[in-house]
Amino acid sequence: MSNYTERVLKMVKDRNPGEVEFHQAVEEVLESLNPVFEKHPEYEENGILERLVEPERQIIFRVPWVDDQGQTQVNRGFRIEFNSALGPYKGGLRFHPSVYTGIVKFLGFEQIFKNALTGRPIGGGKGGSDFDPKGKSDQEVMRFCQSFMTELARHIGDKTDVPAGDIGVGGREIGYLFGQYKRIKNRYEAGVLTGKGLDWGGSLVRTEATGYGLVYILEEMLKENDLSLNDKKVVISGSGNVAIYANEKVTQLGAKVVAMSDSSGYLYDETGIDLELIKEIKEVNRGRIKEYLEEYPEAEYSEDYSDIWSIDCDIALPCATQNEMDAVGAQKLIDNGVIAIGEGANMPLTSDAVKLVKDNGVFFIPGKAANAGGVATSAIEMTQNAMFDEWTFDKVDQELQKIMVNIYKNASKVAAKYGLKGDLAAGANIAGFLKVANAMLDQGVV
Ligand code: NDP
């Protein structure tokens, strides 16, 4: 690291004690930026990094609600409005018991660069709560969402800050949140949230977008290296939104998914996972992946979900959560001859795992690039809302493909320009950084 990046990283650690995921995300980006600061002293002269690592605004609030037993419950709500150099803050809401400032800041920081890579005019933000929707009734989830939005509403708007879903926040939650926003504001401001229902301002392909986008960029990378998805064996962790639609698209393109997981364990079906059954278990019934065995008793199930990486495969797509693949998992994949790893989740590989994967010549697509299809399609949803228009599935899907191919080309071109040919992670960090940093330079010290 250069003096400049080291100094800023130290400042981040001192100023945000204990926020280890945030430190990890900042360190990973800063490490790749050294060649940029050698060429461009103007960024340091204008304090770009110091400003970039400090959120423009951090909102933490109480979320009181009443459960089905009549008991008052209190959760904590967050919205980190990180950077608005390119457009309104944009990023999802995560409802999971592990949520605290360190998680929301790491996600918000990543989001700045990811959103820049999409080429759409959106800034970076993220939010959520330590509320756990698992095991709650629809009524409880609704009361929680209404209370959460009662506070959040004053901070967001279609030109200010546009939240969406993430872990634990899907179509049901977005519906309740939107209903409460509309009630408070007395405005049908469709563009204030994305991931809406198709009958009330949502976009076709948004549900599929992150998983499909991951596969589009993977396909492009393989193509550039004279490879294809045909007949490849794939392991996907998670069985939520990203995992399900990554499975759907790789399968359509000729690969076979042999394993998926949830936070209780993983499933291995050597004949290929029956995705329709997974959708029924996870999307319709909100059940556990283990229930798959009731239909396919010959499939294997293990409660050690982190051991999913010991399964022999050509391609691994971690699509569950941060730091879900450590160096041990990465080494198992390498020993089994894995060709490529694409991060469907945000920061699913630990820093050690990333290093190992890169050192062993495995093709690696970082989350910022690999899962940008979700937010890119959210931006397309905002475009349709602003135009009072509805695009066809094919039109949105083609636009998504174009964006993912562009992200790949842009990140590889920039990596090569800075002497890091083939390092897509560095290319994505630098390309995203340059776009945001130049906008910040143009806009003065704000
Ligand atoms: P979902 O809530 O739909 O699914 C998450 C999946 O991961 C579930 O199968 C869940 O298991 C599993 N999981 C969650 N936490 C853990 C944990 N601590 N350990 C093991 N497994 C876990 O979320 P998404 O699919 O939307 O998000 C997955 C990842 O993709 C996240 O990192 C998110 O930030 C990222 N992402 C999502 C985007 C989107 O458009 N949805 C866009 C870009 C990135 P269980 O069912 O047991 O809870």
Image (spheres, rainbow, N blue to C red):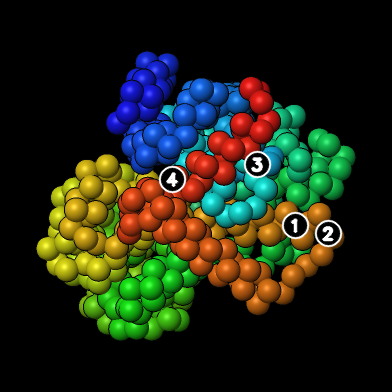
Check disc 2 and report its element: helix, strand or loop. Answer: loop
Q: Which mark is residue 383?
A: 1
x and y percentages locating residue 141 in the rendered image: 59, 44
Relative placement, left or right, of 81 versus 15 is right
Whether residue 197 appears in this view of the structure is no
Which residue: 68% across, 74% down?
395
Indicate which disc, 2 or 4, sits on the residue closer to the N terminus: 2
The residue pinned by badge 4 equals 429
Contact check, label 1 and label 2, Cβ < 8 Å = yes
Per the image, the residue denoted by label 2 is: 387
Q: Residues within 10 Å of mark 1 (few under 14, many from 20)?
A: some
- The quadrant of the image that shows the N terminus is top left
The vertical placement of 409 against 115, above or below, is: below
Residue at position x 12%, y 63% in the image: 335
Q: Is residue 387 left or right of residue 263?
A: right
Compared to residue 355, the image places residue 302 above or below, namely: below
- Residue placed furthest toward the right: 186
Q: Position of residue 354 (x, y in %)?
A: 26, 49
Q: Is residue 259 left or right of residue 114?
A: left
Mark 4: secondary structure:
helix
